[in-house]
Image: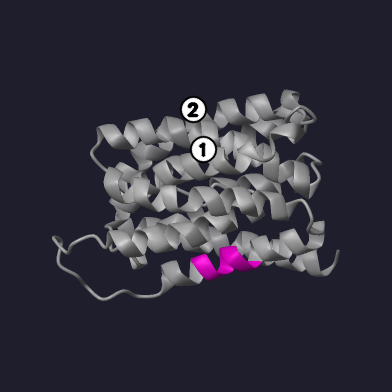
Amino acid sequence: MSALLLALAAGAVTGLALGALGGGGSVLAVPALIYLLGFTPAAATTASLVVVTVTSATALVAHARDGHVRWRTGLAFAAAGIGPAMLGGAVAGRLPDAVLTAAFALVAAVAAARMLRPRPAREEDRPIRHGRAAAAGAGLGAGTGVLGVGGGFLAVPVLVGVVSLRMREAVGTSLLVITVNSLAALALRAGTVDGLDWAVIAPFAGAAVLAAWDGRRLAAKVSGPVLQRIFAVALLAVGAFMLVDAVAW
């Protein structure tokens, strides 16, 4: 299969995940860029940030129209992560590829386990804990910078489990966090963008943007708990594959 067709297919899956789940785009895009399209881990993480920034910003508009974005919570969460994301981006350039791959896999597995863990029922009007959102956002930003991902696959579990948002609100709000964190991480990777293969990245991003709209419609038809399980199983599968690859590096 040609690189163009692979890029279109991988982009469509990435966009579908971002649109429906509010995350998972980077955790799917990075492996696709490495294992299907021949990118190095360093180039893949930068290219993934470009793709996910464009796609998440597009999907954010649609979720905002549906009223599923908690702007105050999301901005506090994202603002707290800007500095750590930029610092993490500087650190990432000094780490071996195998270390980055293993860290990526382990973080994905932890996020998946959190999503699968049963949560006690809560009242629908439970107040949002903005202080805890900001603290969690700082940690997420650091991880975003180091791993070169938008952070949605971490933001959704934190917004659900720590901040106590409902799943659909967590999906929409995470897109705001992803957009801000990705832009911050890209700020320190700007010098490496010119060396990327744009003949692959452009169709990848285009397919992702189009598929994100379908993902939003899918999210409207599938219950929150089902989305959580789909999200968690996908993370576990990708994380396991990348961990095995890192160990064998």
Mark 1 packing: few (<14 Cα in 10 Å), some, or many (20+)? Answer: many
Residue span colored magenta: 106-111
Kind of residue sitting beneath label 1:
Gly
- Quadrant assignment, res 40: top right
> Which residue corresponds to the image point at 57% horizontal and 57% vertical from the top-left?
142
Report the predominant secondary structure element of the magenta stretch.
helix
Kind of residue sitting beneath label 2:
Leu
Return the mark for residue 210.
2
Q: Is residue 249 above or below residue 66?
A: below
Cα separation between marks 2 and 1: 7 Å
> Which residue corresponds to the image point at 63% horizontal and 44% vertical from the top-left?
29
Q: SS of the residue at dot 2?
A: helix
Across and down, in percent, residue 169 comes to 29, 50
Return the mark for residue 112.
none
Across and down, in percent, residue 176 comes to 40, 42
Name the quadrant of the C terminus: bottom right
Task: Indicate left or right for 218 with 108 as reference.
Answer: left
Mark 2 packing: few (<14 Cα in 10 Å), some, or many (20+)? Answer: some
